[in-house]
Amino acid sequence: SQTEEALTDDLRRRAYYGVSAAMSLGQDVGDLPFQMRARTLPGAARFFTAGRGITMPEPGRTTVPYWVTTPAEARAAAQELAAQKVDIVKIWVDDRNGTYPKLTPELYGAVIDAAHTGGVRVTAHLFTLEDGKGLLRAGIDAFAHGVRDRDVDDAFMVLLAAHPNLVLVPN
C-alpha cells in the first residue's frame, strides 16, 4: 500500500488474521514507509521496509528500485539504503524469462559487501540454481524465493549447510 490510510488498513487486516509483522520488499518510496515502521498501531501488524530494492534496468517496469549497471552504482545504492536504516536490502537476480539482464555476480557482490559494511542484511529474489549458488558464495542472508528452475543439487546443499542462518521465504 502506498498511502497511510491504505497501509494502516492493510496492517490491521493482517493482524485480524493473525499476522504480527509484514515487510515490504523493495517497492517503497519516500518517508511514509519509515514513518509507519516507527509507529505502534493498536490492533495492527508491525511494519518493516526494504525501501527501494536494487536491480538491473528493467525498462517498462517500475522505476522504484535502483537501476544499477556498475559495481560503483550497486555499492552506492546499498550504502544509501544502509544510511536510511532499512530493515533489509532487496535485490532481484532474475532475468524475467529472458526479458531483462539480471544482476551479475560482480554487481550483487558489491551490494552484499556494501550492505554488510553498513550493518544491513540482504535478501534476493532469484530463480535459477546457479544464481542461488553464486548468491550463497557472495554471502547472501536470505532468499525472498527459493530456487525454481530445477531441483537443487548436492553442491547447493553443501553451500546451504555452510550458511545455517540463511532465511528462506517459500513461494
Image: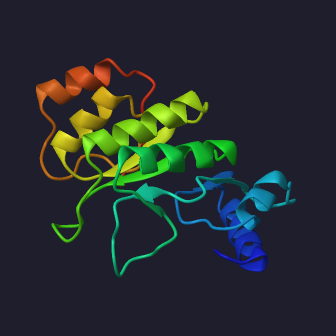
- Residue at image x 76%, y 54%? 37
Q: In the picture, residue 130 is in which quadrant? A: top left
**Residue 101, percent across and down?**
23, 62
**Residue 93, percent across and down?**
30, 52
Q: Residue furthest bottom?
A: 60
Q: State the quadrant of the N terminus.
A: bottom right
Q: Is residue 169 in sight in this rendering?
A: no
The residue closer to the viewer here, 47 or 28, is: 28
Left-right relation of 110 to 88: left
- Residue at image x 70%, y 67%? 30
The residue closer to the viewer here, 46 or 62, is: 62
Left-right relation of 32 to 114: right
Q: State the quadrant of the C terminus.
A: bottom left
- Residue at image x 66%, y 64%? 14
- Residue at image x 57%, y 42%? 79
Q: Is residue 67 in sight in this rendering?
A: yes
Left-right relation of 148 to 39: left
Q: In the picture, residue 43 is in which quadrant? A: bottom right
Q: In the picture, residue 154 is in which quadrant? A: top left
- The total number of labels drawn is 0
